Amino acid sequence: MTGTSVAPRRSLLRHPATAPSAVLAAGAAGAVYLYNTDPHEPGHVLPQCPFRMLTGLLCPACGGTRMVYDLMHGHFAEAWMDNRALLLASPYALVLLGRWAWAGLHGRRWRPALSPRAQLAVLAVALAWTVARNIA
């Protein structure tokens, strides 16, 4: 036998760009479906909020599907009414997604880290928003 060794092939699933690419593809597919499906009208196949189904209360993300639909159709005032907090957080989330995809496409892994103080702030805002929207 010869002493040749074959270098192990790196799995495509382990490439740093795979996860952000999959998230972007799923988001694009969901956006195409949602663009043609008005969530303001009943009878469509759209996910239901498990928190609302169990408690009857609005969670911090309730109205997000309607908000995205309204944004895609240029109805900014309606999107604001659907979920203000999520609308304000959306640009930040899109920047994080873009940063993750950029790093992955350049062969690097990127994992954002929030300090415990930042995590507590996000939790406090989500909790305050949940209480505020369920009182009104």
Image (tube, rainbow, N blue to C red):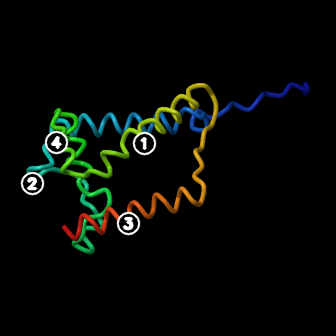
- Decide: is 123 above or below 7: below
SS at mark 2 in the image: loop
- Decide: is 86 above or below 17: below
- Tag shown at residue 42: 2
2 or 4: tag closer to the N-terminus: 2
Looking at the rendered image, the disc whose residue lies closer to the viewer, 2 or 1, is 1
- Tag shown at residue 93: 1
Amino acid at dot 3: Leu
Amino acid at dot 2: Pro
Question: Where's the N terminus, which quadrant?
Answer: top right
SS at mark 3 in the image: helix
Mark 1 and mark 4 in contact? Answer it, CB < 8 Å. no
SS at mark 4 in the image: helix
Q: CA distance from mark 2 to mark 1?
A: 28 Å
Question: Where's the C terminus, which quadrant?
Answer: bottom left
Looking at the rendered image, the disc whose residue lies closer to the viewer, 2 or 4, is 4
Circle 4 sits on which residue? 77
4 or 3: tag closer to the N-terminus: 4
Q: Is residue 20 left or right of residue 131?
A: right
Report which quarter residue 106 is drawn in: top right
Measuring from the top left, give residue 112's x and y in whole percent: 58, 45
Q: Is residue 130 left or right of residue 46?
A: right
Q: CA distance from mark 2 to mark 4?
A: 21 Å
Tell me which residue sits at (27%, 66%) in the image: 132
Q: Residue furthest bottom?
A: 55
Most foreground residue, 110 or 48: 110
Measuring from the top left, give residue 73's x and y in whole percent: 16, 33
Looking at the rendered image, the disc whose residue lies closer to the viewer, 1 or 3, is 3
Disc 4 residue crowd, few under 14, some 14–19, many 20+, Cα 10 Å: few
Circle 3 sits on which residue? 127
Report which quarter residue 52 is drawn in: bottom left
